[in-house]
Amino acid sequence: MSVTELPQSPTAGLYQEIQQFYAQQMHLLDDGRVGEWADTFTEDGVFAANAQPVPAVGRAAITEAAAKATEAYAAAGVQRRHWLGMVSVESATPEAVTARCYALVIETPRGGRPEIKASTLCEDRIVRSGGTWRIQDRQITRDDLI
C-alpha cells in the first residue's frame, strides 16, 4: 500500500482541531497576550520544562512565569516565535487528547537576524473544559538538555 492509498484517519477532524488550538495558542504567546495564552491551560494546569528547576503549577503560576519571560524579551528588543510541527495525536477520547509535537523557538533581535534558540519536544494532555480545549499538563523537553 502506498502513502496515497492510506485510508482517511477517523480522527481527521479532531487532529485539525488540535492543530488549530496549537496555532492559536502560540500566536497568543508570541503576540505577548500572556493572560489569554495562560487561559488555554486548565486552572490546575502544569507547565514543566527540563530547562526549569520546578514546574509552574496552576494557571496563576503559569501566567506569572510567562509574563516575566515575555517582559524580559520585550525589554531586550527580542521577538520570539514558536514554530510547532510534526503534531501527533497519540490518544483521544471525546474529552481528552494526548498530543506530541516538535517546537522550534526562534528569536529575532530588533534589527537583527532570526536564530533558532531551542529545539524541543512538547508533550501535552489536552482536555475539553468550558467548551474549549485547554492544556492540563505540558511537558517540554529541550533537545540540548537531554
Image (tube, rainbow, N blue to C red):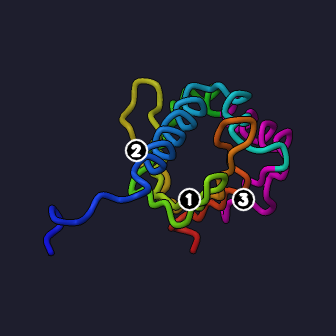
Name the spot of residue 125 as percent of width and height, x first: 66, 58
Marks 2 and 1: CB-CB under 8 Å? Answer: no
Q: Quadrant of residue 31?
A: top right
Q: Which residues are magenta?
A: 45-72
Q: Nearer the viewer, residue 15 or 23?
A: 15
The structure residue drawn at horizontal position 42% and vertical position 49%, both measured from the top left corner, is: 116
Q: Secondary structure at mark 1?
A: strand
Residue 115 shows which numbered tag? 2
> Disc 1 and disc 3: Cα gap in Å?
10 Å
Classed neighbour count for the residue bearing mark 3: other residues with Cα under 10 Å, few (<14), some (14–19), many (≥20): many
> Disc 2 and disc 3: Cα gap in Å?
24 Å
- Left or right: 102 in relation to 59: left
Q: Secondary structure at mark 2?
A: strand
Name the spot of residue 81 as percent of width and height, x first: 48, 37
The structure residue drawn at horizontal position 49% and vertical position 60%, both measured from the top left corner, is: 89
Residue 108 shows which numbered tag? none
Q: Secondary structure at mark 3?
A: strand
Q: Which residue is mark 1?
A: 122
**Mark 2 vs mark 3: which is more N-terminal?**
3
Q: Amino acid at mark 2?
A: Glu
> Disc 2 and disc 1: Cα gap in Å?
20 Å
Q: Nearer the viewer, mark 2 or mark 3?
A: 3
Q: Nearer the viewer, residue 15 or 49?
A: 15
Q: Is residue 100 magenta?
A: no
- Left or right: 35 in relation to 57: left
The structure residue drawn at horizontal position 52% and vertical position 62%, both measured from the top left corner, is: 121
Q: Quadrant of residue 77?
A: top right
